[in-house]
C-alpha cells in the first residue's frame, strides 16, 4: 500500500515537473538574443493581468512600452510564445511596409463558426487582402465626402443629447456617450440605418454592440476558450454565445 502510494506520488511529481518544464521551455528565448523585456511567469507569460481581466492588452503593451524607453525592441511572452513590441520607428516601418509579407499574419486563432473573428484585425493574409481591397473601395476620399452630411447629422443629435446633461449640471462618464455617437455614425454610414443609438437608451443596435465588446465574464471566458482551447471553442459552436441580443 505504502509502495503504491509512493509510486503515485513520484509519478505525480514527474508529471508536474515535466508540465512546468513545458510551460517555461521558451522563456529564455529573448534572453539568448539579448532582448530586454518583462519577466514571464509559467502558463501566463506576461499576460496574467489580461487573463484575469484586470487590464486590456493595449494597456499592458503601453505599460511595457513606457517601462523600456531606451530599448528599440521589447521581448515579451504571450502565455508561452515569444512576441515583440517595437519602439524603433525604422523597424516599425520595415515591418509594416518593406517586409510586410513576412509579418502579415496576426497570430490570432480564427474560428470558422464565429463571424466576429473574420475581420481585418484578425484575418490571415490570404483572406485579409481581398477583404481589405473591398473595404478600400468603399472608403475612398470621394465616398467619405458623400458620408459627411450623415456624420454632421449624427453630431447634431449628439450635441442635443449632451446639452441635456449640461442643462442639469450633471457629471457624466463620457465613455458611453462617445460610444453611442460612434455606434450611430457606423450604423448610418456603413449599414444605412438610423440606429437611434444616441437618443434611445433602449437602442437594440447599441445594446448588442455593447454586449459584444464589454468586459463581462461571458466575453472574457469566450476569448479565453478561443486563445487557450480552440478545439473546444469550435466544438461548442452557438452555445458559446449569449442569446441576449
Image (spheres, rainbow, N blue to C red):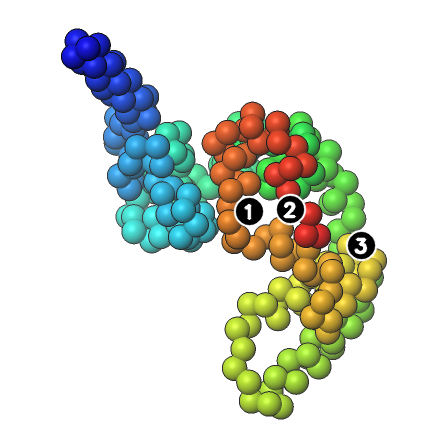
Q: Quadrant of the N terminus?
A: top left
The kind of secondary structure element at disc 2 is loop
Residue 235: image location, x then y, percent: 61, 27
Q: Earlier in the sequence, mark 3 or mark 1?
A: 3
Mark 2 residue crowding within 10 angstroms, few (<14) / some (14–19) / many (20+): few
Foreground of the two, 123 or 65: 123
Task: Please state which of the two labelled residues, at mark 2 or mark 3, is closer to the viewer.
Answer: 2
The kind of secondary structure element at disc 1 is helix
Image vertical order of residue 27 relative to residue 171, above or below: above
Q: In this view, does 180 lie to the left or right of 141?
A: left
Q: Earlier in the sequence, mark 2 or mark 1?
A: 1
Residue 179's tag is none
Image vertical order of residue 16 relative to residue 132, above or below: above
Residue 242's tag is 2
| Tag 3 residue | 191
Residue positioned 53% across, 52% down in the render? 216
The kind of secondary structure element at disc 3 is loop
As measured in the structure, the alpha-carbon distance from the residue carrying label 2 to the one carrying label 3 is 23 Å
Image vertical order of residue 32 relative to residue 159, above or below: above
| Tag 1 residue | 219
Amino acid at each position: 500500500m505504502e509502495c503504491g502510494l509512493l509510486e503515485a506520488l513520484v509519478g505525480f511529481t514527474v508529471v508536474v515537473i515535466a508540465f512546468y518544464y513545458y510551460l517555461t521551455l521558451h522563456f529564455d528565448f529573448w534572453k539568448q538574443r539579448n532582448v530586454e523585456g518583462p519577466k514571464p511567469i509559467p502558463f501566463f507569460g506576461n499576460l496574467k493581468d489580461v487573463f484575469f481581466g484586470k487590464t486590456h492588452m493595449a494597456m499592458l503593451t503601453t505599460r511595457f512600452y513606457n517601462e523600456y524607453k531606451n530599448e528599440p525592441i521589447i521581448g515579451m511572452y504571450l502565455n508561452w510564445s515569444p512576441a515583440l513590441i517595437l519602439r524603433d520607428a525604422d523597424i516599425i516601418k520595415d515591418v509594416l511596409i518593406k517586409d510586410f509579407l513576412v509579418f502579415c499574419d496576426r497570430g490570432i486563432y480564427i474560428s470558422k463558426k464565429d463571424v466576429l473573428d473574420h475581420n481585418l484585425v484578425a484575418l490571415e493574409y490570404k483572406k485579409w487582402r481581398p477583404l481589405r481591397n473591398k473595404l478600400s473601395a468603399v472608403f475612398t476620399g470621394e465616398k467619405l465626402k458623400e458620408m459627411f452630411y450623415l456624420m454632421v447629422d449624427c453630431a447634431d443629435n449628439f450635441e442635443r443629447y449632451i446639452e441635456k446633461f449640461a442643462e442639469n449640471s450633471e457629471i457624466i462618464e463620457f465613455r458611453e456617450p462617445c460610444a453611442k455617437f460612434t455606434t450611430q455614425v457606423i450604423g448610418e454610414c456603413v449599414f444605412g440605418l438610423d440606429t437611434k443609438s444616441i437618443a434611445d437608451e433602449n437602442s437594440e443596435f447599441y445594446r448588442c454592440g455593447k454586449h459584444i465588446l464589454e468586459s463581462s465574464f461571458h466575453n472574457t471566458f469566450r476569448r479565453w476558450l478561443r486563445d487557450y482551447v480552440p478545439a473546444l471553442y469550435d466544438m461548442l459552436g452557438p452555445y458559446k454565445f449569449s442569446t441576449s441580443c
